[in-house]
Amino acid sequence: MDDARLQRLLPLNPRTFAILAVLLEGPAHGYRIKQEVEARSRGAVTLDPGSLYRTIARLLDEGVVEPVAPPPDEADEDERRRYYRVTALGRALVSAEGARLDALLRRSGLREGGAA
């Protein structure tokens, strides 16, 4: 993976990180992403449709997510739904962001193994 490309995409804002975290578990459509992000964050991260779809469009342009066919068990649902999944670049990006945040916590002394 191109480290310079990853560094250019970092740091991730909380909304982007939350969207990618949902998609790491498998393909999802926009409304499901919104529901999952808000449930997992207990409402701390909210996504209005405009910000959600602008973020998805940017992630598509950057090659971090890609469109996919609906899962077989959801293929007969609303045909207007677009499904997305994380690419290899997206997985590397989430991993790099996790490492960046972990290092930040360690340096601050808030994570075991960091400054006291």
Image (cartoon, rainbow, N blue to C red):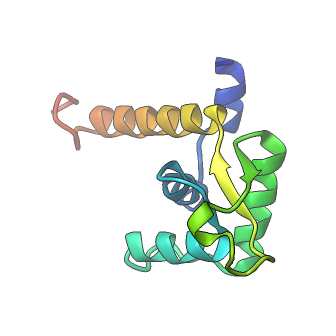
Rendered position, 57 above or below 4: below
Q: How many marks?
A: 0
Q: Quadrant of the N terminus?
A: top right
* Horizontal and vertical percent position of residue 33: 58, 69
In-front residue for pair 57/98: 57
* Horizontal and vertical percent position of residue 75: 68, 69
In the picture, residue 98 is in which quadrant? top left
* Horizontal and vertical percent position of residue 94: 52, 40
In the picture, residue 29 is in which quadrant? bottom right
Rendered position, 71 above or below 88: below
Give me the residue at 81% from left, 77% from top: 80
Q: Is residue 8 left or right of residue 17?
A: right
Give me the residue at 58% from left, 62% from top: 15
* Horizontal and vertical percent position of residue 32: 57, 73
Rendered position, 45 above or below 68: below
Give me the residue at 37% from left, 31% from top: 103
In-front residue for pair 21/81: 81
Q: Is residue 116 left or right of residue 55?
A: left
Give me the residue at 31% from left, 40% from top: 105
In-front residue for pair 11/72: 72
Q: Quadrant of the C terminus?
A: top left
